[in-house]
Image (cartoon, rainbow, N blue to C red):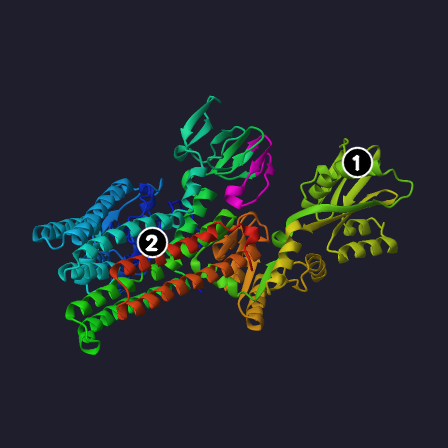
Amino acid sequence: MTKTTLPDTTAKPAGACAGDACCAPATALEPAAATSKVTGASVFRIPSMDCAVEQSDIRRVLDKIDGIRGLNFQLGARTVAITAPDDVIPAAVAAIRAAGYEPTPVTASLESGAPEHSDHDGHDHDQSTGIGRLALALAFAIGAEALDFFVSDVPAMKYLGLAIAAIAIWLSGVETYTKGIKALGRGKLNINALMSVAVTGAFFIGQWPEAAMVMALYAIAELIEARAADRARNSIKGLLALAPEEADVQQADRTWKSVPSGDVLLDAIVRIRPGERVPLDGVITEGRSAVNQAPVTGESLPVDRAAGDPIFAGTINETAELQFRVTGVASNTTLSRIIHAVEEAQGTRAPTQRFVDRFAAIYTPSVFVLALGVALFTPWLMDLTWLEAIYKALVLLVVACPCALVISTPVTVVSALAAGARRGILIKGGTYLEEARNLRAIALDKTGTITEGKPKLVDWEVLRSEGDKDTIGRAAMSLAERSDHPVSKAIAQGLKLPVGDVDGFAALAGRGTQGSTGGRAYVLGNHRLIKERNQGSTELTTKLYSHEQRGRTVTLLADDDGVVAIFAVADTIKESSRQAVAELKALGITPVMLTGDNVATAKTIAAEAGIDESQGNLLPEDKLTEIKALQKRHGATAMTGDGINDAPALAQADIGFAMGGMGTDIAMEAADVVVMNDDLRRIPETIRLSRRTHTVLMQNISLALGIKAIFMILAILGMATMWMAVFADMGATLLVVANGLRLMKVPADKVPS
């Protein structure tokens, strides 16, 4: 399976036009959207490439050229990045031009990601002008119908009506005719070609009022459809507004100045007041506040953030002023990478979409041949006049356009991708979105995935009956607070007692620490240190064994008379892990824990999480082997992890889930889905979203084909008019678009299984 990576660049989200049937102007994006940072790629803007069918035309001609190593299409920006040697690029450009398109080179600044020029794409994107023109066309079409109905027997009025109909067709159909003629010139039969032939034929056989009305209604419905589809195409674009355009940056003289976010350099100090959005990624240097991270991670509740904690662009500072050091410039923030990753995902075709595209490529010419057969043979077989047969064939052409079928898949997939992104689930392509519903097993790493990934003090007890617990606790706190060992830090954070003075403090490598506090000498260390001091006992060994069987690390506090207290530290299970495992089981998926930790700890944590099967002491290659075994035993298998050691298994799994909060860059690049807030419940949520997406896709395909089949039969039987044909076609299109958009409205916790 080919894996995609989390891009390290910024780009505006691409639209996802869905075939020639929906070739209404796409929403114009900012110039930066045209930039594609594909290593070794030449980027070209193609103004007239605003539909998936046109993209397929270009892909088809470029696939025939030897030397092209990769193609990256961005429909919203109307660009294609061609990865090929320099001597192959001219041939690629010539092939695109021969196909009827005009490519224009796009260059960009590597530092800023902004293009050096921002030429208009050549399309009329002023929707208000388009509405006015179409309203005028509709008025002329109604006028033509009125003249034909009331004064058709007056020759002068008939010619006036014919002229008015021609004007209506020209006003509403100029773009359709332009594209249709180009398609016919290339021997391609798409919706524009079908409509051009149908309207022209109807006009010349004397059905000019109907021809005018059909073209006007088609253009208006197409505009309505485009606006509806824009909700899916631009669903992720709203994230762009989350990061403010300016940042309050500290100057060399310690004063503050408002600076465009794009001009802020790494390591600059930025100030954000309560209620403000964070402009860039960084690490907090001063202050403590609650931060709403929902725009990036999907977390419903604000999280506390203090000095040393990371902070993301687009999140909201809620309660107090913060200062942070910038760690990611505007073109490389977590937010911008999410946007670009979704853009890349929108540009890929899901399996269902690839099937629909292949089907439409055969379906459209087949219907054209059927219509030709109706025109030529029904006069002989059904005793029709030639004009009646031709009209029936033209109606069939209008009914048969693949608009609803072709648009049904990308709108649905993009809506689902956007819904996931808003919940902190970054799915890197429609393929993984669709495949998630087929999962039968999922392997889960322990540390940082099922557990918090940070040791915590979970239990401590004083072993001397005469010992004062507070005094002994303060002694342990005083030693632990001065150590940088993770276990000592966990003890200090867990005790939270006053710290006393320590004399003669020293770290004992691999064993612990020592020092004097409160007039007594203490050591705080592991069992090995206690054995070296000959202070062990059978009772102590039994206690240690009991804790170790529960996956805990034990630290002992001792003085000259023996062991004073015992402290148990463990990597605790996340609150969400149990619920996530229960949800996975309810979905019919078998969870298995794979960890490099010891077998006893693995079994303990697995039991706490509700996992029946676990494997411990695994090296990275062992995890890879286990994934292969699970695939053989269960079928489609996912892997979830956050570390470098998980990367091979993530790459081998049918779908790899990476924890984006604590996860390493390598793990996130190897994964197909990134969970931005490390909440395991997002995984069953992804599977439910996948299943719902599949259901909606099947509904849309069934609706599109079913409506087509009914009206094609009516057309052949002579029971359908062109009016009915265009309403059936565009009605089905709007229906599947609306159905696909429903995915963005379903709350994640109500996504059905």
Q: Amino acid at mark 1?
A: Arg
Q: Most extreme residue toward the left, as rendered?
A: 156
Residue 414 horizontal side relative to residue 48, left or right: right
Residue 537 visible in the picture: no
For residue 719, above or below residue 32: below
The residue that disc 1 covers is 474
Q: Amino acid at mark 2?
A: Cys
Tell me which corner region of the image, top left, top right, bottom left or bottom right, holds residue 562: top right
Residue 5 visible in the picture: yes
Please name whichever residue, 193 or 673, is drawn nearer the observer in this view of the structure: 193
Locate the N terminus by quadrant. Answer: bottom left
* Label 2 – label 1 distance at C-alpha: 66 Å
Within-10-Å neighbours for mark 1: few <14, some 14–19, many 20+: many
Please name whichever residue, 579 or 518, is drawn nearer the observer in this view of the structure: 579
User: Magenta residues?
Assistant: 285-309
For residue 602, above or below residue 43: below
Within-10-Å neighbours for mark 2: few <14, some 14–19, many 20+: many
Give percent across and percent down for residue 305.
Answer: 59, 36
- Between circles 2 and 1, the one closer to the viewer is 2
Disc sitting over residue 221 in the figure = none
Instruction: Assign a secondary structure to mark 2.
Output: loop
The residue positioned 81% from the left and 40% from the top of the image is 522
The residue that disc 2 covers is 17
